[in-house]
Image (cartoon, rainbow, N blue to C red):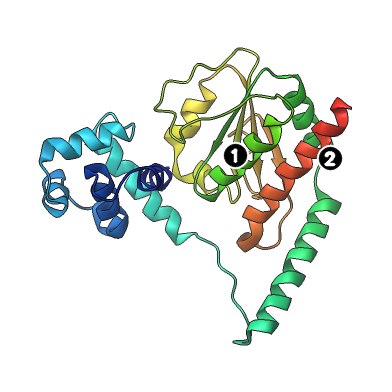
Amino acid sequence: MLMNKINNILNTTYTNDTYHSICKYIKDNILEIQNMSIDEIAEGCFVSKSMISKFTKKLGYETFKDFKYDCEIHCDLIKYMPTTEYKSNNLRENVIETMDLITNAFRNAANKIDYVALDSLIEDIDKCSCVVAVGHGASKNVCESLQFYLDYMNKPVMIADTDFTRDVLVEENSIILLISANGNILKHDRRLINKINSLKQKKWLLTCNSNIDTNTIDNIVVIPSKDKAINDMLTMFMVKVIANRLKHIKK
């Protein structure tokens, strides 16, 4: 997603770098960017129109229109960002409430998850030549954790751009693993889903959304969840479970 790309540039460039300045402007004004013209953005960044065009191509977008499309998706997803509503203003009570919520959620997931589907995903990961992981927002962090854990088992994990604009040479025996904690990307970015489904490799979805259309992705592991606010934790936990299971299989 757009913000992953923006943050990557902000984290890897100097503050006086032109791309850094453009990224900062876009991030600070993201809600307005979706309705701004290329001339208005260039004026706001104190750069030329051609520099903005060059910048969007650096992000992987073929056209400025594609860049604006991703801005709209990001702003739509912000509306669905889950939060926890507390009954009290007392910090201690809120921490205890959160811990109870997390404990119950993990226990519920452990009791109700489809272990047949989960075991099938783990088996595919074990047998494949490479896992191509796709995630947006916080789910990209989950993809990076999967890559980190599987590095220790010499199982290649490639994290693809969330819009697949970068040319990806996907090996024939690879699997595509889309991680979307709340499943929002399946509703808001049909372009990405269509691109993923155009690939011939086996596809998996790891999500906490039990209302996903089963026709969207061939194979799905749903992590049962009662609270969207901790879905990112549940997907991160499940990646750890997958890694531990693979390690056990390798013994």
First along the sequence among labels 2 and 1: 2
Nearer-the-camera pick, 162 or 95: 95
Q: Secondary structure at mark 1?
A: helix
Q: Secondary structure at mark 2?
A: helix
**Is residue 187 positioned above or below 163 on the image?**
below
- Report the side of 45 relative to 223 (left or right): left
**Is residue 205 positioned above or below 188 on the image?**
above
Image quarter for residue 25?
A: bottom left
- Residue 48, position as x, y percentages in the image: 10, 41
Residue bearing the label numbered 1 = 143
User: In this orientation, does residue 34 appear?
Assistant: no
State the residue lying farthest toward the top.
Answer: 172
**Is residue 93 positioned above or below 115 on the image?**
below
Q: Nearer the viewer, mark 2 or mark 1?
A: 1
Nearer-the-camera pick, 40 or 146: 146
Image quarter hosting the C terminus: top right
- Residue 162, position as x, y percentages in the image: 47, 36
User: In this orientation, does residue 38 appear?
Assistant: yes
What crowding class fits label 2: few (fewer than 14 Cα within 10 Å), some (14-19), or many (20 or more)?
few
Residue at horizontal 77%, vertical 71%? 100
Residue bearing the label numbered 2 = 115
- Residue 63, position as x, y percentages in the image: 24, 32
Image quarter for residue 1?
A: top left
Check disc 1 and give the amino acid type.
Cys
Residue at horizontal 84%, vertical 40%? 115
What crowding class fits label 1: few (fewer than 14 Cα within 10 Å), some (14-19), or many (20 or more)?
many
- Residue 209, position as x, y percentages in the image: 64, 50
